[in-house]
Image (cartoon, rainbow, N blue to C red):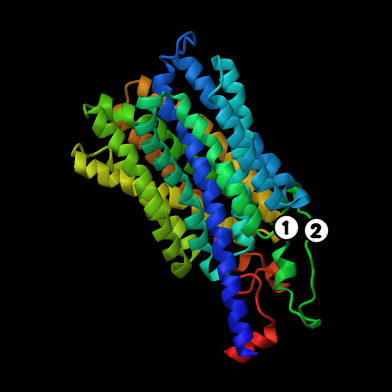
Amino acid sequence: MENSSVSTHHRSRASAIAVVLVCWGTVVADGFDIVAYGVALPRMFDEPGWGMTSQTAGFIGSAALAGMFIGSIVAGTVADRIGKKRLLLASVGLFSILTAACALANDPMVFAALRFVAGLGLGGVVPIAGAITAEFTPIRYRNLAYAVMFAGLPTGAIIASLVGIWVIPELGWRAIFALGVVPALIIIPIGLRFLPGSSPADSRAPATHEPQTPPTPDRPGKAGELVSPRLRLATLCFFATTFLCLFMIYAIQTWLPRILNEAGYSLGGALTAVLIFNVGSAVGVVVVGFVADRLGTNTTLLGAFALTTVSIAGLAVTSELVVLYILIGLAGVGAVSGQTLIVSLLSQTYPRRLVAPGMGWTLAFGRLGSIAAPTILGFFVAAGFGLRGSALALATAGALALAVGVVNPAGRRGFLRPQHEAQGADATDETVPAPPRSTTRSTS
């Protein structure tokens, strides 16, 4: 009996690891696709007959983000009705095929339309991957699992940057979009094989029909429940902190090279700063996730907000390039880790049936921050605020995120999903599927 329990435990842990890795792969593809446009943009201005202007480039960038905004809402709303696994893989297929089609676009408006539809798929990836990760990983490793998954975004950004440096000078800007079909060819077959398609509540149900743990599958959640009296303040706080986090991340990704270049730093040094921001994000988010599983999600989240605020504010008071690099790397750790921990705290707060719609709507609202970031910070740059003024503006966003995080009732232990934990679903510390309760006790 004990050997059987241990064997089942190892298989279930391996299954959870496979889920996290597949979700990580989908988010890597998401991060690659998002950054590919920025990497290709300088060469797109030279495309014969396109007449690209800064206004056209901004419109195309906004088209993809608008698609992601809609995709996040739709995916979060319908995920539990049509199946998370099916929707995640469909989203990967959609944005992969449409991204590859961008390589064939014959004018900017066709390209923008293709980017919009690709954005619909991109918008569905992160909330659904996050919901799947929440369902099929054990609570005691939940923050680390989220950290690994979300590390896919900066990892994809780094890959896009490196691939662009190698591919675009030799093959032109269209080549990096043609590579966008690769995720569909790799991730969909692997996802079909390793992603579970059944509810974890069913998987966790013990083999015996004990009265205290009957199978109780959740009904599909409705988005309106996110603003029920008990959850309303927490939902608004999740919306606000996600908006502010994505605002900071996209503002830095978009404007940091230009701001540093105008401040007198070389273009190579300015581009290196963006690479350091993404490397710091990719490595730091995993380290912070490990810490959060030991110190607590909310405590670590507030620390991430504080780190982001202090690091960005530091950019306003130093001109030493090495110090700037360190501060930018720490800002990447804090901002991206903060976004990761927001999602983790959200998954611990809402009933399981509301995790997918909660993530979808929260990330959709956050996309408004990413859309607003280039325009708002661009105003500061155009007004001549320079590095100092821009850094203080972004640090203000970090301070606001910290203040909202303190107010968020989800940070209180007693607030975290009490009815759901009482049912026993998702409260177990075992991976999915857990062995029968009686067997687990016999091995302890």
Q: Where does the image place residue 29, in percent across and percent down from the top left?
A: 52, 43
Q: Is residue 271 visible?
A: yes
The circle on residue 219 is 2
- Residue 50's place in the image compared with 67, above or below, is above
Residue occupying the point 60% across, 45% down: 125
Characterize the local packing of mark 2: few (<14), some (14-19) or many (20 or more) Cα atoms within 10 angstroms.
Answer: few
- Residue 278's place in the image compared with 374, above or below, is below
Three-letter amino acid code of the residue under disc 1 = Arg
Residue occupying the point 50% across, 30% down: 177
Q: Where does the image place residue 68, in percent across and percent down from the top left?
A: 60, 35
Residue occupying the point 46% across, 28% down: 175
Tell me the element at label 1: helix
Q: Is residue 308 visible?
A: no
Mark earlier in primary sequence (1, 2): 2
**Quarter-of-image position of residue 231:** bottom right
Tell me the element at label 2: loop
How far is disc 1 from disc 2 in space, using C-alphas?
A: 7 Å
Three-letter amino acid code of the residue under disc 2 = Arg
Q: Where does the image place residue 20, in percent across and percent down from the top left?
A: 55, 59
Q: Is residue 44 left or right of residue 268?
A: right
- Residue 342's place in the image compared with 292, above or below, is above
Q: Where does the image place residue 374, in percent across and percent down from the top left?
A: 45, 28
Q: Are marks 1 and 2 in contact (CB under 8 Å)?
A: yes
Outermost residue toward the left in this view: 320
In-front residue for pair 51/291: 51
The C terminus sits in image quarter: bottom right
The residue under label 1 is 353
Characterize the local packing of mark 1: few (<14), some (14-19) or many (20 or more) Cα atoms within 10 angstroms.
Answer: some
